[in-house]
Image (cartoon, grey):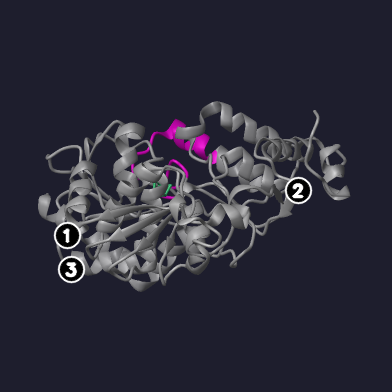
Amino acid sequence: MVKSMYLTPEEEAMYDGEEGSVVKKSMEILVALGDIYGAKRMVNISSAQISGVSYKTIGDAGLEYLEEFAATGVKVKVPSTLNPAGIDLDQWQEMAFPEDFAQKQQRIIDAYQQMGISTTCTCTPYLVGNVPTVGSHIAWSESSAVCYANSVLGARTNREGGPGALAAAICGKTAEYGYHLDEDRRANYLIELETSLNGSDYGALGYFVGKIVGSGVPYFRLQSIPTVNDLKSLGAALASSGAVALFHVEKTTPEYKDAFNDLDKNDIETITVDRQTINKNKDILSTTANKPDLICLGCPHASLEEIKSITELLNGHKLNIPLWVCTSISVKAAADRMGYTRIIENAGGKVVCDTCMVVAPIEDLGFQVIGVDSAKAANYIPSMCGLDVVYGDLEKLIKRK
Ligand code: F3S
C-alpha cells in the first residue's frame, strides 16, 4: 500500500506491524482515511467514542470482527467509551428483550471491555466523564455527540465511523483533516431567527436547517438563550436530517467569534426562520395523528436535569401507557439516589440505561406508535424501526394519551 501522509517513527512502527496485527490494521485504516481526505499527518487524540455497539446495527459480522480483535489481546491507548447498545444490560429480561439478541449483545460488550473500553454505552459521554477540553483532538463517532463536542465543547473531531473510531482508539491517533483544521471550522450559513424558541422548538429548528445545509457549518443568531440541553437537541437534529458536525451560536458557543474569519461575505448564505417554519417542521416530524402507545424520552441520553424536569411534569400523574427515559448507567445512579427513578416508576415509567428507542429492537416488543420529544428520534424511528412517531414536548405527549 502506497501512502502519501507523513508518519512519525512511532507511527511508522505501528504501520509496519511492530505492535501486532490489529495495531497495524488500525493504522492502515487511519492512513487510508488520511490519504482519501488529504491529511498531511496524524494528531494525538485525548479520547475516543465508539459507535457500532448495538447488535441490531452490526449483526453477526460485526460481533465476529470485534471478537477477533479482542482475542488478540489488543488494548486501546486513550480513554474510550461506547455508544448505546441494543438492550438495557441490567433490565433486559423484565423489559422483555429477546434472549438470543441479549446474549449476542452481551458478547459485543464483553469484546469491547476486553480491549479496555469503558462499557458506559451512552451517546452523551460528555455528561459522564468523557469530556474533552477546548481545542483537543478526539475521535468520536456518534453524530449527536460529535456535534456537541465540536460546537459546545470546542473539541475537534470528524464524524468517525465505528471502525475508524476504534482504530483511532487503538493507535491513540487520528488523521488531521476536516474539523481538526481551523479552516474547516468556519461557518457557511447564517441562520437568523425571527422567533424565540423553547423545548422541542430546538429540535424542529435543527431538523429544518440540517436538511438545507447538509454537511455545512451553520451559525445561529437566536432570539432566545439556549440551555445546554437545548444545544444537545439542536445538534442531534442537525446531525440527523443533515450531516452537520459543527455549528456556532452567537454569544454562546466557544468559537462563534472566529466563525466568519477570512471568509468572503458572498460565500455565506442567509436563511431566515420564523414561527410558522418551526411549527410546520414540528408537524412534519409526526408521522401519524394516532395516540402513542409508548413514550420515549432521552435522545440524546437524558441529563440529570432533564430527568428532574420529567419528574416535575409527571407530578403525581399516573400514565396509562409505558414511558421510557433513556440515559446512561451513571446518570441513572444519580437519579436513583435523588429519588427521580422512583417518581418515574410510580407514574408507570422506567429509567432505561445503555440503550435507546432507535438502536433497541422496539419493533419486536409490540409497539406501533412512539411519542418522542427528540427530532432525531422522530426522524430515525420510522426508517430504523418501521414504526410511527408523534413529536412534541412531554406535556403534549402525556395529554395526547
Ligand atoms: Fe442517542 Fe439513540 Fe438518540 S444513540 S442520540 S438516544 S438515537
> Who is closer to the viewer here, 318 or 270?
270
Residue 111 horizontal side relative to residue 99, left or right: right
- Amino acid type of disc 2? Arg
Q: Are marks 3 and 2 in contact (CB under 8 Å)?
A: no
Q: Is residue 149 visible?
A: yes
Q: Is residue 49 visible?
A: no
Density class for disc 3 (Cα within 10 Å; few <14, some 14-19, many ≥20) is few
- Please provide percent x and percent y for residue 26: 72, 39
Is the residue 142 above or below the residue 290 in the image? below
Q: State the separation of the CA atoms marked 3 and 1.
A: 11 Å
> Which residue was labeled with disc 2?
41
> Which residue was labeled with disc 1?
395
Is the residue 286 above or below the residue 194 in the image? above
Q: Nearer the viewer, mark 2 or mark 1?
A: 2
- Please provide percent x and percent y for residue 23: 77, 41
Q: Are marks 3 and 1 in contact (CB under 8 Å)?
A: no
Density class for disc 2 (Cα within 10 Å; few <14, some 14-19, many ≥20) is some
> Which residue was labeled with disc 3?
315
Residue at 56%, 64% in the rendered image: 131
Q: Nearer the viewer, mark 3 or mark 1?
A: 1
Count of residue discs: 3
Q: Which mark is residue 112?
A: none
Residue 104 horizontal side relative to residue 364, left or right: right
Residue 100 horizontal side relative to residue 10, left or right: left
- Amino acid type of disc 1? Glu
Q: Nearer the viewer, mark 3 or mark 2?
A: 2
- In the rendered structure, which segment of residues is drawn in magenta? 85-106
If you read the primary sequence from the N terminus, does the residue marked by circle 3 or circle 1 appear first?
3
Residue at 38%, 57% in the rendered image: 190
